[in-house]
Image (cartoon, rainbow, N blue to C red):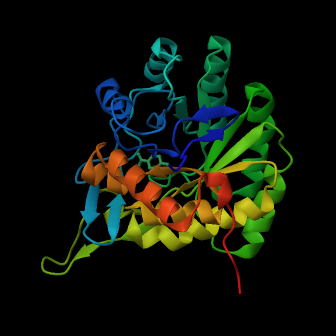
C-alpha cells in the first residue's frame, strides 16, 4: 500500500489532493461535493470584502488537450459567507478547511484577516497574491515591494501558520528575490505555486474571434500547457524555502503529473482545470493512479521521493 497522507501548516491531510481555489468552491453546495469526494482537503473561492458577480461570460473556456483560459473576475459571495461557512464547518472531519482571501487592496485583506482571527477557527488561510483578472488591478505577486509590505502587515496579524498563492515567476532573479522576502516571515508556512499564467489570448481560427469576453479576450491560462512552468516554480521555491512547504498546482490531469509535482518538491497538490472538466469524482481516479505509480516504483510514502528530482 502507498501512503498519500501529508501535512500543511502543521495540519494533517488524509491525502495530498484538493481543489485549486476557484474551482467548485464558490457556494456551499459545491463545497459539499468536495467534502463528499475523495479529496484530501478543500479550499474556498477567493473572497473579496464585498460580494462580486465577476466578469461577463463567456469567462472560462476549456482548450481541449491544452488546458483552459479564464477571466472570471473574482465572482464570490463576499468574505462573510466564507467566514460563516468556516464557523459552521465540522473540524472533526478528516479534511482540514482552507480559506482563500483575495482583497482588492491591503486594507481589505487586513479587515478580512482580522475577522478570521477574531473568530479563532482552525481553518488555514491562503492569501491570494496573484489574481490576474480584475481590470485595472496589477497583481501583488509581481510587485515585490508591495508584497513584502503586505506580508509585514498580514503575517503578525495572522500569527499562526498561513500560506500565500503565487503567480508563476519566469526569471531566476525573481525566484531569488521573492524567496528572500518569504524567508523573513516565520509563520508564512507554505506557498502555493502556481496561479494561472496571466493574460494569455485564445482565438478561434474559424470565426477569428477571442474565446472569452472580458478584457478583449485576455485571461489566465491553466491546465496541461502550464505544467512545466508550475513544476519549475514548485522546485524553485522548494529549493529556496527550506523551512516552508510548497503546494503544487498546474497541469495535473493524472497521477503522473501529480507524481512529478511531488518529485519537484510539492507537499500537496491542487487541481483546477481538470477538476472543472471532470468533476470531483476525479479525486478517486487520480489517487489510484498515484498509488499505482508509487507501488510500481517502490515508494511507500510521499517523503520517499518528495523533492528528489535528479539533475544532470
Ligand atoms: C480569479 C482568478 C484567479 O487566478 C485568482 O487567483 C482569483 C480570482 C478570477 O478571475 O475570479
The residue positioned 54% from the left and 32% from the top of the image is: 98
Q: Of residues 221 and 261, which is closer to you in this image?
A: 261
Quadrant of residue 29 within the rendered picture: top left
Name, please, the residue furthest toward the bottom: 312
Where does the image place residue 274, in percent across and percent down from the top left?
Answer: 34, 56
Q: Nearer the viewer, residue 233 or 200?
A: 233
Q: Please name the residue shown 79% across and 36% down the image.
A: 187
Q: Can residue 107 be seen from the camera position used here?
A: yes
Nearer-the-camera pick, 163 or 308 = 308
* Residue at the extreme right of the image, as rendered: 184
Please tell me which residue is depicted at 66% across the width and 36% down the height of the picture: 106
Residue 289 drawn above or below residue 170: above
The image position of residue 218, as x and y in percent, is: 37, 65
- Relative to residue 53, is residue 294 drawn left or right? right
Q: Quadrant of the C terminus?
A: bottom right
- Image location of residue 7, percent across then percent down: 64, 39
Taking depth in this image into account, of 31 and 297 the one nearest to the observer is 297
Answer whether residue 212 is visible to the viewer in this image: no
User: Quick check: 175 left or right of 294?
Assistant: right
- The residue positioned 48% from the left and 66% from the top of the image is 296
Q: Is residue 98 above or below residue 290?
A: above
Is 120 displayed left or right of 92 in the figure? right
Amino acid at each position: 500500500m502507498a501512503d498519500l497522507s501529508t501535512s500543511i501548516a502543521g495540519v494533517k491531510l488524509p491525502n495530498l489532493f484538493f481543489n485549486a481555489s476557484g474551482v467548485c468552491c464558490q457556494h456551499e453546495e459545491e463545497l459539499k461535493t468536495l467534502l463528499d469526494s475523495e479529496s484530501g482537503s478543500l479550499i474556498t473561492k477567493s473572497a473579496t470584502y464585498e460580494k462580486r458577480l465577476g466578469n461577463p461570460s463567456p469567462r472560462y473556456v476549456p482548450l481541449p488537450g491544452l488546458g483552459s483560459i479564464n477571466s472570471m473576475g473574482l465572482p464570490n459571495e463576499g468574505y462573510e459567507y466564507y467566514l460563516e461557512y468556516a464557523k459552521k464547518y465540522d473540524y472533526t472531519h478528516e479534511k482540514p478547511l482552507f480559506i482563500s482571501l483575495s482583497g482588492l487592496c491591503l486594507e481589505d485583506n487586513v479587515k478580512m484577516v482580522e475577522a478570521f482571527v477574531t473568530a479563532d477557527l482552525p481553518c488555514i488561510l491562503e492569501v491570494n497574491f496573484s489574481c490576474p483578472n480584475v481590470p485595472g488591478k496589477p497583481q501583488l505577486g509581481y510587485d515585490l515591494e508591495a508584497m513584502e509590505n503586505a506580508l509585514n502587515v498580514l503575517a503578525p496579524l495572522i500569527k499562526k501558520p498561513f500560506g500565500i498563492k503565487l503567480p508563476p515567476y519566469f526569471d531566476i532573479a525573481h525566484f531569488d528575490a521573492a524567496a528572500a522576502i518569504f524567508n523573513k516571515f516565520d509563520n508564512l508556512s507554505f506557498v502555493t505555486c502556481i496561479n494561472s499564467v496571466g493574460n494569455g489570448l485564445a482565438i478561434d481560427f474559424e470565426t477569428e474571434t477571442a474565446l472569452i469576453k472580458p478584457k478583449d479576450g485576455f485571461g489566465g491560462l491553466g491546465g496541461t500547457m502550464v505544467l512545466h512552468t508550475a513544476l519549475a516554480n514548485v522546485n524553485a521555491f522548494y529549493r529556496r524555502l527550506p523551512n516552508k512547504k510548497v503546494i503544487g498546482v498546474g497541469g495535473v490531469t493524472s497521477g503522473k503529473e501529480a507524481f512529478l509535482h511531488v518529485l519537484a518538491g510539492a507537499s500537496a497538490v491542487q487541481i483546477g482545470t481538470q477538476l472543472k472538466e471532470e468533476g470531483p469524482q476525479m479525486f478517486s481516479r487520480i489517487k489510484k493512479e498515484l498509488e499505482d505509480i508509487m507501488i510500481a516504483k517502490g515508494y511507500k510514502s510521499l517523503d520517499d521521493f518528495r523533492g528528489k528530482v535528479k539533475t544532470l
